[in-house]
Amino acid sequence: MTDLTPPPDDPARPSIGTDEWVERHDERLQETRFGQAVGRVPSAGWLAGFVLLAALLPLVSDSQYVIRVGVDTIIFMLLALGLNIVVGWAGLLDLGYVAFFGFGAYFYAILSSDQFDIHWPSEVTVPIVTVACALLGLLLGLPSRRLLGDYLAIVTLFFLQIFITVVTNADRLEIPFIGHAVNFTGGPNGIPGVDSFDVLGYEIESVRQYFYLALGVFVVVIVALALLSDSRTGRAWRALREDPQAAELMSIPVNRLKLAAFSLSAATAGLTGTIFASLHTGVFPTDFDLPLLITIYAMVILGGAGSLAGVVLGAIVINVSLEALTDPEHARWLFYGVILVSLVAVLRPWRRLAAVLGGLVLFGFALHVIVDAASSRWTAGAGAGNDIVARAVDGWVLLPSDPTRIGNIAYVGLVAAVLALTLVRGVWRLVFLVPVLYLAAFVWENRLAEQPSVTRLILLGALLVALMNARPQGLLGSARVEIV
């Protein structure tokens, strides 16, 4: 019998414990001219280009809303970078991260407002707040350094809830030897009238000025973190993330690294909190609740935990998308645009894409004509919006006169249809994809487009679920190889 086993030195022979697709990533990247061009650009070049483009935003747009969204996006980028230290590099599930952000904002507000009639300049307040947040992160890390996974998540989440409870009720604290209650945080009303940033005698007041301030802080933070990532500490953090026991056996100071990750992450969040408090001229307990934590985690997961460029990209995509979803017309463009881009990226060869899009158009118009002939109440409704997309789908999507109840039923049916679609294979998946996409458009026009607050969360969750199935490591994250 002929032995068909490749010789040991044969490159076609599979390597035990090695993901060959990941191993050949660099080789595949260099197979294209685009990949070669990307590989030749250093990280500093990408950062310089990004900062240059971002700096042009206030110059090309006079809209205060657009610039304000830009400032908020940079704040989210800083928060994502800070969370990436403890989660993406050290591999620690920290659910109390937002508390450091809130602590920095409140501490800055106390030292720079009429709350206690303290108006220290920013050059003094910001370093004090940043160091205080780093020490607070160190204190949280001390009892948590022996905890992993779910246990660490419970302890840190408890810390976040303690922070929210304290700032909500610290408006009537009884201090010994004072004889009366002291209002530290303003309670549910927060601390208004926070001072603006004062940098070397130059007062920053306008949104445009805060944009450049936040952008400058972002450059300093990301450059520092990039240098740290390439250092011994950065490599030790990644070793801790992959296998804490193996890292400890290799004489890596695991506990000390955990404390350092908590401390540096908290310092970054606290620094960002000072900008937030000064920009909004006030801080309130509801600004630092659980939804903010979920949003920041979504940014890190979407971009790719462990990747500096990835978490920045995730922050941009999610914050801009959430802002776009507040306007029904912008949300409609985003909804249909994401579906079209997804179909173009997934369906191959091109004839399948043409078949699905052509079938979807014909299916919609045919169904609209048939249903309208049977009962006009299914097409008597009015769509939300008057933009070109709304007018285009007006004669394609069914718009009932009473869309609420029908829309709720259709939403449940859409969830069931998407789950059923994952069980279908081959050509039948393409066939069933057409009515599923039409049902998604029906639900959007009749139910989701009119409820932006609910729609934002639903589409954010759908985006993360789809991405985690298609690319578990995130947009720019590196795939991990596990040996089982």
Image: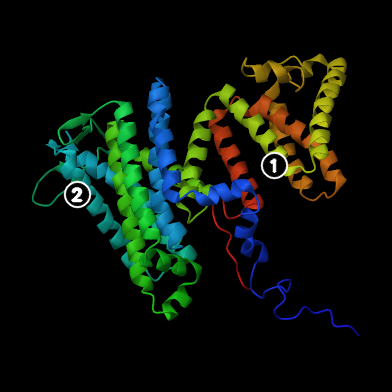
Q: Quadrant of the C terminus?
A: bottom right
Q: Nearer the viewer, residue 114 or 359?
A: 359
Which residue is more in the foreground, 291 or 36?
36
Residue type indicated by callout 2: Ile
First along the sequence among labels 2 and 1:
2
Image spot of residue 249 (x, y percent) = 44, 80
Q: Is residue 99 visible?
A: no
Q: Position of residue 185 (x, y in %)?
A: 24, 41
Q: Residue at x 54, y 48 (%)?
A: 38
Q: Residues within 10 Å of mark 2 (few under 14, many from 20)?
A: some
SS label for mark 1: helix
Residue at left 47%, top 48%? 309
Residue at the bottom extreme of this rendering: 1
Crowd tier of the residue under label 1, counting other residues whose Cα lies within 10 Å: few below 14, some 14–19, many 20 or above = few
Q: Position of residue 83 (x, y in %)?
A: 41, 52
Q: Residue at x 57, y 63 (%)?
A: 480
